[in-house]
Amino acid sequence: QKEVEQNSGPLSVPEGAIASLNCTYSDRGSQSFFWYRQYSGKSPELIMFIYSNGDKEDGRFTAQLNKASQYVSLLIRDSQPSDSATYLCAVSRDYKLSFGAGTTVTVRA
Amino acid sequence: DTGVSQDPRHKITKRGQNVTFRCDPISEHNRLYWYRQTLGQGPEFLTYFQNEAQLEKSRLLSDRFSAERPKGSFSTLEIQRTEQGDSAMYLCASSQSPNQETQYFGPGTRLLVL
């Protein structure tokens, strides 16, 4: 079992719709949770982090964390073509990040 | 805040050669991390430093890999006797402990071993 698993994708959504990304993790000792966006050929760029159970909103992005279910999600509202990228879920334990393989999102105009 | 920088951005080498990459973290960040990413996968942790101390090294890292951070500022990652399987993007990240766990990534060094 991989430490961090994400929807394999690709996920195609129309412009203006909500994109929903899911991530599960196996290590119950995971302490912090991150979503990174990665454009093709570029390095990961931080979108959001979340430490506590519940929701956290930042602009068009909402992260949700449920530690009991070992589940993290990311919602992208009002999706734009510029949101087309691979989204990486990462979990942290003892300062090291473990990443999922990523979900590729395509926003079609 | 100039961000994390890495040099070179691209490297092509022949199998068996040694290569060295450099990473300059965000100036006030005392933790520095190295990751490797292959196509279609997320980054994999290799090693990290707090100041000049190397605190952990992944079991995935063979003896051909070595990293240093001699003065607690920039870091180098050396790969000796490169193999084709070493072809990947090598990513450096930094964070500021103890208050921030968030890691910020540099642009990466893309290595191709022929």
Image (tube, coloured by chain):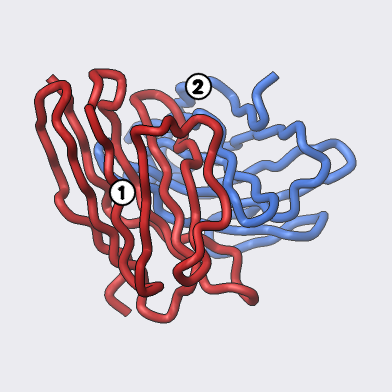
Chain colours: A blue, B red
From the image, tell me which residue sits under label 2.
A9
Name the residue furthest right.
Answer: A68
Whole-percent x, y for residue A107 in the image: 39, 35
Quadrant of the snapshot with the N terminus of chain B: bottom left
Question: For this rendering, which residue is in front, A56 or B46?
Answer: B46
Q: Which residue is drawn at 25% across and 34% down?
A: B80
Q: Are marks 1 and 2 in contact (CB under 8 Å)?
A: no
Label 1, label 2: how far apart the Cα atoms are: 33 Å
Residue kind at label 2, given as amino acid type: Gly
Q: Mark 1 = which residue? A: B77
- Nearer the viewer's eye, disc 1 or disc 2? 1
- The quarter of the displayed image where residue A54 is located: bottom right
x, y percent for residue B16: 17, 24
Residue occupying the point 50% across, 22% down:
A9
Residue at disc 2, secondary structure: loop
Determine whether the residue tagged by mark 1 lies in a helix, strand or loop: strand
Q: Subunit of mark 1?
A: B
